[in-house]
């Protein structure tokens, strides 16, 4: 991560990660009174996806209403309307309509998707199975909303390492999708090298590795009887000997936003 920092009023975005496998902004969660600055940053950077990693069930932090049809007016300039909501076992998915009223009475309107992954910090079999579908959904939205250049994904909540671990997993899975099954073991090994930099504990490290395996299976990148998959599973087991390794089966959950 770079030393990049962006401030709007009292709100700070902490880091910007740019690579050929995605562009991400890691930010602090908006505190009381910072909702307008947070939405302003979403508009400025044309962010289409906001991923929130806090464990709280209702964690919109005031920048949108968690109820369908709810509307937030922020400082008379920004309007955020909640269009739809889908509840999943480990996450909540919102489709939001953002309007910015400019001084010349023109309006900029955009759709933003918010994914509240409220169990990312929990290492469990159920959580592992949902990770692949959440990543597939995020990548699908990115493909649809990519108008010019890379559309950044904003990740916030839970602290810098919690956000960084999700970003690393996301980037590795995009790399895996592009380069194929033969790179699965190399991707697992890459995460192992960055373990002490971007993961805060062994549970989070194990969750990232399990998430990569789950995504590879869900996205039909690798077959479970293939040599690449068996080698990767062996490496994951060696890396997480103090944590249970959950069986990976293809998820039958549907993607929410299509």
Image: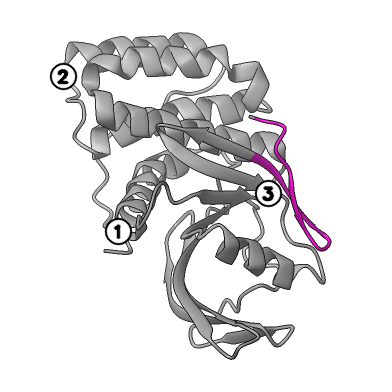
In the image: residue 219, left or right of residue 51: left
| Callout 2: SS | loop
Q: Position of residue 9 (x, y in %)?
A: 81, 63
Image location of residue 185, percent across then percent down: 34, 13
The Cα–Cα distance between marks 3 and 2, rounded to whole angstroms, is 40 Å
Which type of secondary structure does the marked residue at label 3 adopt?
strand
Query: Residues in magenta?
Result: 2-15
Q: Is mark 1 on a helix, strand or loop?
A: helix
Q: Mark 1 points at which residue?
A: 144
> What numbered label is drawn on residue 100?
none
Can residue 173 be seen in this snapshot? yes
Point out the image quarter for the N terminus. top right
Q: Is residue 200 left or right of residue 253?
A: right
- Residue at image coords 32%, 47%: 136
Asked whether residue 14 is drawn in magenta, I would say yes
Q: Which residue is drawn at 68% across and 49% down?
A: 27
Mark 3–mark 1 contact, CB under 8 Å? Answer: no
Judge whether residue 59 can be spotted in this image: no
Residue 197 sits in quarter: top right
Check the image and report above or below for 33 versus 218. Answer: below
Mark 2 closeness class: few <14, some 14–19, many ≥20 residues within 10 Å: few
Mark drawn on residue 225 = 2
On screen, residue 31 above or below 17:
below
User: Whole-Å distance between the Cαs marked 2 and 1?
Assistant: 33 Å
Residue position for label 3: 27
């Amino acid at each position: 991560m770079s030393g990049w920092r962006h401030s709007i009023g009292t709100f700070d975005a902490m880091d910007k990660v740019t690579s050929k496998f995605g562009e991400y902004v890691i930010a602090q969660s908006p505190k009381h009174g910072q909702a307008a600055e947070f939405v302003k940053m979403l508009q400025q950077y044309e962010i289409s996806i906001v991923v929130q990693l806090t464990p709280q069930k209702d964690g919109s932090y005031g920048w949108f209403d968690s109820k369908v049809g709810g509307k937030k007016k922020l400082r008379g300039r920004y309007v955020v309307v909640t269009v739809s909501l889908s509840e999943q076992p480990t996450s909540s998915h919102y489709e939001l309509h953002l309007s910015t009223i400019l001084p010349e009475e023109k309006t900029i309107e955009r759709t933003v998707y918010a994914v509240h992954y409220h169990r990312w910090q929990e290492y469990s079999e159920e959580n592992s199975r949902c990770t692949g579908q959440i990543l597939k959904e995020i990548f699908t939205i990115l493909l649809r909303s990519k108008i010019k250049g890379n559309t950044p994904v904003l990740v916030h909540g839970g602290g810098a390492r919690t956000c960084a671990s999700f970003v690393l997993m996301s980037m590795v899975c995009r790399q895996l999708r592009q380069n194929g099954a033969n790179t699965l073991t190399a991707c697992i090994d890459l995460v192992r090298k960055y373990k002490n930099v971007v993961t805060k504990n062994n549970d989070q490290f194990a969750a990232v590795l399990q998430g990569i395996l789950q995504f590879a299976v869900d996205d039909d990148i690798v077959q479970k009887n293939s040599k690449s998959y068996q080698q990767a599973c062996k490496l994951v087991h060696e890396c997480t000997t103090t944590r249970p390794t959950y069986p990976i089966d293809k998820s039958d959950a549907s993607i929410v936003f299509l």
